[in-house]
Image (tube, rainbow, N blue to C red):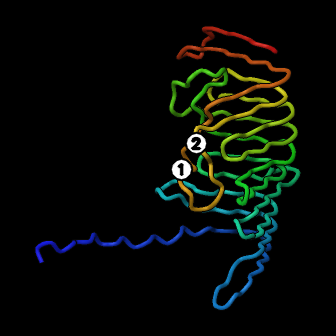
Amino acid sequence: PKNAEVKAPVEPKKPPIPIELEGNKITVAITTLGSKKELQELIAKGNVYVFQAGEKPGEKAIDITGSTLTLNHVALGDILVVYGDTKVPARLEVGDSIIWGPRVTVDQTTNHADVEGAGGMDMSSNKSVDGADSKSKTTRIRINWNKNMTFDGHLAIFYGGVQAVEKGARSGALCQTLTAYTDKHVPFKEGQKDKQSAKIDKLVFDRNVYIDNTKTDDKDQFVQRAIAQG
């Protein structure tokens, strides 16, 4: 027939990218309902390493190291807890954002990442530490804290002796509480997109604020320095 509808061929669905897990001792609990098997709990101890490749060659979706890892599966997602030891903290890398500390918890049911204790976070940024728009597409800010941190994928709050430093620059800031806003939502659930593209878009410093905004030339010589306290 002349008006016969021509349907485009359906592209086959890509299989999920596998997640690799290493550890000295791994315990897995699986439930069976009919012919379906589902992971309920996983505990890995000793030299734990978890890796999942990204969709593009050379990219990483997940990269986790720690001394102990626990994973509990619930209806809305997984709750992952990674512990470090006294010498090496737990480390979680999602896309190009890195979080580390003595205990890192990722709750997919609420899309939260939390760190108990002193830790650090390294993330791409649209802004410099002083709040000005960054002139570089590769600007990264490292934030360290002494108490704890919570991150809901859009808003991260850091508590206790917080230090923010722009990597490769001389500018930095100190305060007791720092709130960082990202330009895009960071999803902690496997399979969601755009988790590599989020950047810090706004920084809010609170209590005992000290900002050192130092400018240098191409030869790393001082050009301008401004200090703000509050």
Q: Amino acid at mark 1?
A: Asp
Residue 93, compared with residue 38, is above or below; it is above
Q: Mark 1 sits on what residue?
A: 194
Quadrant containing the C terminus is top right
- Residue 113 locus on image (x, y percent): 74, 51
Look at 55% across and 25% down and name the residue there. 134
- Residue 42 locus on image (x, y percent): 77, 72
Q: Is residue 202 left or right of residue 1?
A: right
- Distance from the alpha carbon under mark 2 to that under mark 1: 8 Å
Nearest to the observer: residue 224 or residue 46? 224
Nearest to the observer: residue 166 or residue 205? 205
Q: Secondary structure at mark 1?
A: loop
Mark 2 or mark 1: name the one nearer the start of the chain: 2
Q: Amino acid at mark 2?
A: Lys
Q: Mark 2 sits on what residue?
A: 184
Q: Secondary structure at mark 2?
A: loop
